[in-house]
Image (spheres, rainbow, N blue to C red):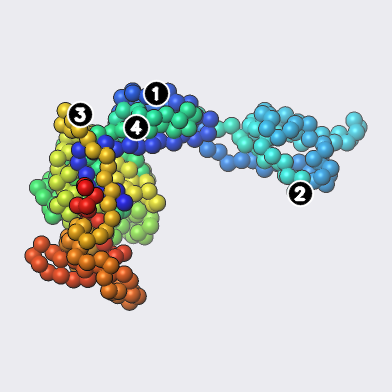
Amino acid sequence: MILPYQFGVAIRTELRLLGRAEISVSVGQRVDLDTVVGYEDVPVEPVIVDVAGALRQSPSEAAGSLVVVPGTRVSKGDVLARAGSQRSLRECRSPESGVLASYASATGLATLVREGDRREVRARTPGIVVEIAPGRAIVTETTGAWVSGVWGAGGVVGGVVRTAGNGPSTELDPRAIDGRYTHSILIAGGSISAAALLRCAELEVRAVIVGGVTSSALTVAAAGNRRSISLPEALYSLGRAQSNLPPLPALMLIDGFGSTSMPEEAWDVLARCDGREAALFAPGRPETPRIVVQLPRREVPQPRPLREGVIREGAIVRVTVGPQKGTTARVVRYPYRPTPTLSGAAAEGVLLRTASGDEFVVPLLNLRLIEDPQSER
């Protein structure tokens, strides 16, 4: 797995285009968040046409009455099939412009793929174009920092990184949020309250990265002047316009739900990126939420590839669930004896030791890898 907090690395991002794509950049070209890199088709639902029904024929008979073959481009109103005599002519016409994709002789139904609109595709991440798959995808490389979270929602957002507070455990104070953070990606080490989320929405903060948030804070902020909403409704509202309410910013949690703080390792990387342009990817599952920050080459003259690691003896991990949640410790022994999860089921255990010397056992599935010293070898 990719280690979650890395500085001074080369990050490659693939951007796939849809349909009959046209790419308008070249290898070696520098792009920023808003650079138009190509054009793609807007996906549209296919249209099902009942050919046999329109001709009052069996599906097999209607197959012989087609006047266009699958793969043919047609316009709205074009004849797809014709049957009967001149005195009792029956026709099936195309309801939309598009391509006749197929005809099913078993059902008498034809599939018409409509022509969609074309739309611009923007780079989403700053960097240099290093690879192009004509008509399909581009790959950009960004020199800078990478921080991934455990949860995120709100889509893909670009902006300048602005840190608030002075450490990884500072809860974001709504009174400290002012015009400096408008259109930015705001970073706070601790948790965020409903009042702070609403203040961010009011000032048009584009995204917030924090240690954690309680479900109650999120639902209260998303409800606005409504009495109450469910947690799924609140999560859906992130980054989206709401009636009579400013949209809540996109959100990424470094440590998880609850009143929790981000690890010092994450804060250290993000604090070094203050004032830099970045892209936050928080599209929801299954994609890992992450922020990619661009740094000048003079600050990172020899960027390393993104490092990967595994949980093994000597690795640094963070406990994500249970009594020791939020504790950072080193792996002493793995695999270790089975240990019960919160549900009572036995799971593979890991023996951990904190910096103060305390030892305890945690289920493997309740750990997040922070650092793997052996990956540097």
Give the CA distance from mark 1 to mark 3.
Answer: 22 Å
| Dot 4 and dot 3 residues touching (CB under 8 Å) | no
Contact? badges 1 and 3 (CB < 8 Å): no
Residue type at numbered disc 3: Arg
Q: Which residue is mark 1?
A: 25
Mark nearer the N terminus (4 vs 2)? 2
How far is disc 4 from disc 2 in space, using C-alphas?
Answer: 47 Å
State if disc 1 and disc 2 touch (CB < 8 Å).
no
The earlier-in-sequence mark between 1 and 3 is 1
Residue tagged 4: 140
| Figure quadrant of residue 129 | top left
Q: Position of residue 7 (x, y in %)?
A: 20, 41
Q: Is residue 172 left or right of residue 10?
A: left
At a point 40% along the width and 35% down the height, the residue shown is 15
Residue 74 lies, with reference to residue 279, above or below; the image says: above
Quarter residue 213 falls in: bottom left
Q: Which residue is mark 3?
A: 297
- Secondary structure found at label 1: loop
Image location of residue 14, percent across then percent down: 38, 37
Q: Decide: marks 4, 2 in contact (CB < 8 A)?
A: no
Q: Position of residue 199 (x, y in %)?
A: 21, 46
Left of 115 or right of it: where is 108? right
